Amino acid sequence: MSIPENATVLTVWEDAPACGATNMAADELLAEEAAACGGMMLRLYTWSRPTLSLGGFQKRAEAEPLARAAQLDLVRRPSGGGAILHGTDQTYAAAVARQHPLAGSPQLLYDAVHTAMVDVLGSMGLEAAMVSENRGHGGGSGESAPDGPLLCFDRRAVGDVVVGPHKVLGSAQRRLSGSVLQHGSLLLRQCDQAGQASTRPGLAELSPGTVPVDALVRRWLETLASSLEMTCVFAGPFLVDGRAARVAERAERFRSAAWLGRR
Amino acid sequence: MKFAKSHEWIRVEGDPAPGALATIGVSAYAVEALTDLVFMQLPAVGTQVTAGESFGEIESVKAVSDLYAPCSGEVVEVHTELPDNLDLLGSDPYGEGWIIKIKLADPSQLDALMDQAAYDASVSDGPH
C-alpha cells in the first residue's frame, strides 16, 4: 500500500453560512480536492436558513410535510443516513482520498472523528460515549428502502456520539471512486424551528455550564489530528478564489428537482 | 472471473467476444466492509453502462457507495429481487448475489482487470 504524501496533514476550512445547495456543492468539490491531494480535509460550516438535509435515498415526500410546516429549506445530501435539521448544529464535511488509511472501511473515518469528540466532551465534564449497536434504521433484508425514522438524531448507528440517551453527533458517508466524503452534524443546542419534531437537547442543554463552541470545535479537530498523528492546519474559508465560482455552477444540480426528487 | 479496483466482479459466459453475456456483482470483501446494507438502486434493462462509471448505488447504515461497471455494455438483465433481499449480497456474492448482466461491448477491457489472486492480494494490502 502506498501512503499519500499528504496523508499526515489535516487541512481545516471554515466557511460563512450558506444555502443547502452551495454547501453540498462545496463538499463535492472538497471531496475532489481530497482525492487529488491524498490528505484529509475538513470543512466546517453552518446554514444561511434553517434547512432539512435529506440522506441520499430518503423519500422527499416523507420530509416535505415537516419542511413545509416549519418553513425549512430542503436539500438532498450525496451521503447516506437520516435527515438532519440544520440551524442549531455545527456541520462538517470530512474527505479523504481512497488510498488514505482512513478510507479502508466506513467505520474507520467515522470512529476517528467521533472518538475525538467523545474525548473532548469528556474533558468538558459531559459523559459522552459511542453507540455500540445499530437501531432504528429500517431497511435490510425484506425491505428495499432506508425507511427508518426520518431524522438522523432519532436513529442510532454504531459509533454515534451520545450524552446519556441523547445523540449529539452523527455522521454518514458517500464513498466515491477517488475519495470518501463524510458529513456530520454536532447538535449544539435544541432547535425550536420544527416543534415536536426537533425538541432534542443539544450540548447547551446537556452541559452543566456554557459551551464555548469555537474552543470546543478547535479542540475536537486538534484532538482528531493528534490521535491520527497528523498535523492540523487551519486554512480559513474554503469558498474563496476560483472555488466560489465552481461551487456556484455545481450548486445548480443540488437545486434541481431531479436531484431533490430522485426518490 | 475478473475484479475491478472498485470491488466489482465480472464473469463472462463463454468466449469473451463482443456481445458475450457477462454477469456483474460486488466482492465479498466490499460487502463485508460496507456492513448492514439497507438500500440499492439499479439501472433499467437497456441502459448502456460504461467501464469505470457508476451504474448503480448501494446504501449501508453509514454510507452510500457507487457501483462501477468493470466493462462497458448494454444491460440485458437486472436482478430485480436483490433490493428486497440484500442479504444475498453477503451470503452468496458470486452466485445468487449477482447484480446485472450485460452484453459485453469491448472484451479488451477485461485485460485491465485483476484476476482473483491479484484482487485478493490488493485487498489484503490496504484500503482502496
Image (tube, coloured by chain):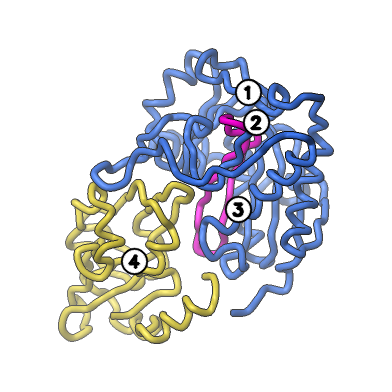
Chain colours: A blue, B yellow
Q: Residue furthest left?
A: B14
Residue contact at pointers 2 and 4, CB within 8 angstroms:
no
Amino acid carrying mark 1 in the image: Pro
Task: Identify the disc placed on residue B26.
Answer: 4
* Residue A86 vs residue A74, the one in the foreground: A86
The residue that mark 2 highlights is: A187
Amino acid carrying mark 3 in the image: Asp
Q: In the picture shown, does residue A221 fall above or below B33? A: above
Amino acid carrying mark 4 in the image: Val
Foreground disc of the pair 4, 1: 1
Secondary structure under the numbered disc 3 in the rendered image: helix
Determine the CA span between mark 1 and mark 3: 23 Å
* Residue A212 vs residue A50, the one in the foreground: A212
Determine the CA span between mark 2 and mark 3: 18 Å
Question: Label 4 neighbourhood size at 10 Å, few (<14), some (14-19), many (20+)?
Answer: many
Residue contact at pointers 2 and 1, CB within 8 angstroms:
yes
Q: Earlier in the sequence, mark 2 or mark 3?
A: 3
Secondary structure under the numbered disc 2 in the rendered image: strand
Q: Which residues are magenta?
A: A164-186
Majority secondary structure of magenta residues: strand
Q: Using the rendered view, name the quadrant where residue A16 is placed.
A: top right
Amino acid carrying mark 2 in the image: Leu
The residue that mark 1 highlights is: A201
* Rendering coords of residue A175 (x, y %): 50, 57
Question: Label 1 neighbourhood size at 10 Å, few (<14), some (14-19), many (20+)?
Answer: some
Task: Identify the disc placed on residue A111.
Answer: 3
Determine the CA span between mark 4 and mark 3: 25 Å
Labels 4 and 1 positioned on one and the same chain: no
